Image (cartoon, rainbow, N blue to C red):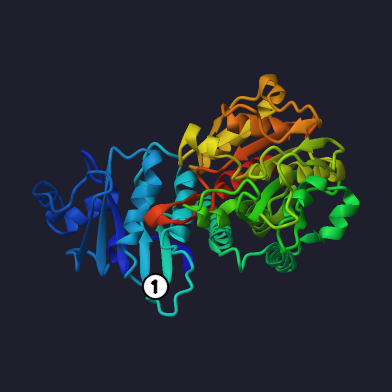
Amino acid sequence: MKFSMVSGDVLKLECGALVVGIPAGGLTPTAEALDKASEGVVSRWIEAGDIHPCVGKVAVFRDFPGCKAERVVFVGLGKCKARDFQRVLKLGIDNAYLGKEVVLTTLEWLPDEVPEWIAEQSGFIACTALDRPKNYKTFDINWKKPKNIDLYVPDENKDVEKAYAEGVSVGVGVQMAKQYGDMPANLCTPKFMAEECMKLAGSLGLDVTVFDEKAMEKLGMGCLLGVAKGSHQKPRMVVIEYHGGKKDDTPVALVGKGLTFDSGGISLKPAKGMDEMKYDMCGAAAMIASIATAAAMKLPVNIVAAVGFTENMPGSSATKPGDILKSYAGKTVEVLNTDAEGRLVLCDVLAYTIDKFKPKCVVDAATLTGACVVALGNDIAGLFSNDEELAVSLMMAGDTAMDPVWRMPLDISFTKALKSNFADLANISDSRGAGACTAAAFLEEFVGDTPWAHLDIAGVANKSGKEKGSTGRPVPLLINFLKDQAE
């Protein structure tokens, strides 16, 4: 699909579908123009209920009188707020997909919002609304998409045009993260992901370093390697560098958990729903997609993304409950539960990244704990941080991107709960309470004084049931955060 701007008389636009908002208690400028050109048809049909202003109600009409569009798609906005915008626009595009060229009139929909924000969100939804997960069926319907989705602006506006293009770029990044997340684990292996990172780096001019098992052994990454021991798939750590800022600027570090499949290891997970453990690498996928998107947008900031890829399997050589592993940082960890493996991967990658690159801040993302899902559900990610300024920046970026997070507590009591009689730390608490908080407290032990934030995305990285699939979150949040860091 192509994405561009169109202007001029909206009624004279020759397009496959014109998407028009209908708010409660009034008409947008385009709806007013259609009403006038059709001699009051819009008003009469609203009164009759054929067009409804209720949020999310959609009505599609061919050959609507007074305009040259093949179809007009009316979308109910109600008293539309920013939180409803993505949903109602997606519904509009879903119902306009038969048109070869779709024109959006969204700049009229939220009069209290900044036009650039509306344009960016419009670009993002235009890019992602018609996404369908890749499948491997021998026969499938050929899903046709519009050739163009254009944003209507009454007059040319470079800032709005730039924002629309940036929204599309974020959408492309989300699609990348979703593509990797949805792949089956027999295809999406640590080796495959390392090769993908190398291809990506080559196409975008990024620096990439891949560490195999022997290289990680030399580095002393005993925790990450301990997770990998039960699988015949060899682990990889990949470090990608983007040099968009000044040469001497310290980078922003992104760290991702890349469990390409997590069976739980010896502490085996229940069979039901275990297929979704292919999504345990969504944190790593998001970090790869974020640095690639930042590079494509040429953001003036230095970024390093470090991701650890492995499987967690119950093989004959697998790490066992009670085993003690030595981390890159030198701390020893008693493994009380092999299904608390993500923190073992992250602690080594975090410590290495901080030691090697001395970043000004580091953000990690991981599908880390079911406890975070219990606490926050499936719409809001958990945010833990040792730095107030960094935490606020991430919360604001999430709000702007409609990719929200909620600040969760870090406290010495959570660290104390990880006490072990045999090692510096246990990888889980002996209590069932505050599982997301103790996991974050474990990671905090490996970041020192570096400003650090941990995003627990277990609830938001993928959907289950009929809508099963990766969401690509938190790529929108991270790109907004990186844009702020570049200013």
How far across and down, in percent of the image, does residue 381 sit?
A: 53, 38
Looking at numbered disc 1 in the image, what kind of residue is underneath it?
Trp
Quadrant for residue 27, please give it: top left
Q: Which residue is identified by label 1?
A: 143
Q: Residue at the spot x=64%, y=40% of the render?
A: 484
Is residue 472 at least partly visible in the picture?
Answer: yes
Q: Is residue 352 left or right of residue 268?
A: right
- Residue drawn at x 67%, y 28% is 389
Whole-percent x and y of residue 89? Answer: 36, 52
Q: Name the element at disc 1.
A: loop
Q: Position of residue 147 (x, y in %)?
A: 42, 72
The residue drawn where x is 65% and y is 37% is 454
- Nearer to the camera, 103 or 324: 324
**Which residue is farthest bottom?**
138
Q: Which residue is more in the foreground, 283 or 466?
A: 466
Judge from the rendering whether residue 104 lies leftward or rightward of residue 234; answer left or right: left
Q: Is residue 301 above or below residue 205?
A: above
Vertical comparison of 240 with 353: above or below: below
With 447 as the anchor, is 275 left or right in this view?
A: left
Front in this rendered view, residue 451 or 419: 419
Q: Does residue 105 appear in the picture of this structure? A: no
Q: Name above or below for residue 172 compared with residue 303.
A: below
Q: Looking at the rendering, in which quadrant would you find the C terminus? A: top right
> In the image, residue 3 lies at what x, y percent?
48, 64
